Amino acid sequence: MKYGVISMCDLLEDLNSWRTLYCAGRLQKPVVLLNTTQEMNERIEDNRRHALLCAILSLGPTFTEYELFHHITALSYTGDPRFLVGAENIHKVRNIVDTNVGAYQ
């Protein structure tokens, strides 16, 4: 379980612009939200739609559902310095997808 505290303004900005992908990346994957607003729900859905489109455009003409979920999950880890220096589990993305595959649908 993870939790975070962030201002609504910063959260909505990251969901909208992907400036840092700190929150937007986490919210592209299956999560349980404890407290939301209508605006936040709309931005989260937009964020997920954008991640879906980004993954589809990056994957090419044919791909499996699993590959799509993997690519969506991997978006938020692109450029993560922990992966670059070997400080993160190299199977992290696969592990997330494998344990949540039903929640992506």
Image (cartoon, rainbow, N blue to C red):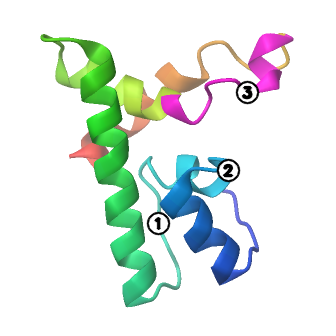
Secondary structure state at the residue bearing disc 3: loop
**Residue 78 is a magenta residue:** yes
Residue that numbered label 3 is attached to? 80
Please report the residue visible at 27 percent of the width from the left and 38 percent of the height from the top: 53
Q: Which residues are magenta?
A: 75-85
Please report the residue visible at 48 percent of the width from the left and 84 percent of the height from the top: 36
Q: The N terminus is located in which quarter?
A: bottom right
Residue 62 image offset from top left, x and y in percent? 13, 10
Residue 41 position (above or below residue 77): below
Q: Earlier in the sequence, mark 1 or mark 2?
A: 2
> How many neighbours does mark 1 have within 10 angstroms: few (below 14), some (14-19), or many (20 or more)?
few
Q: Earlier in the sequence, mark 1 or mark 3?
A: 1
Q: How far apart are the alpha carbons under marks 1 and 3?
A: 23 Å
Residue that numbered label 1 is attached to? 32
Secondary structure state at the residue bearing disc 2: helix
Q: How far apart are the alpha carbons under marks 3 and 2?
A: 10 Å
Q: Nearer the viewer, residue 73 or 32?
A: 73
**Residue 89 is a magenta residue:** no
Residue that numbered label 2 is attached to? 22
Q: Earlier in the sequence, mark 3 or mark 2?
A: 2
Q: How far apart are the alpha carbons under marks 1 and 2?
A: 17 Å
Q: Kindly indicate whether the residue at mark 2 contacts the one at mark 3 (C-beta within 8 angstroms).
A: no
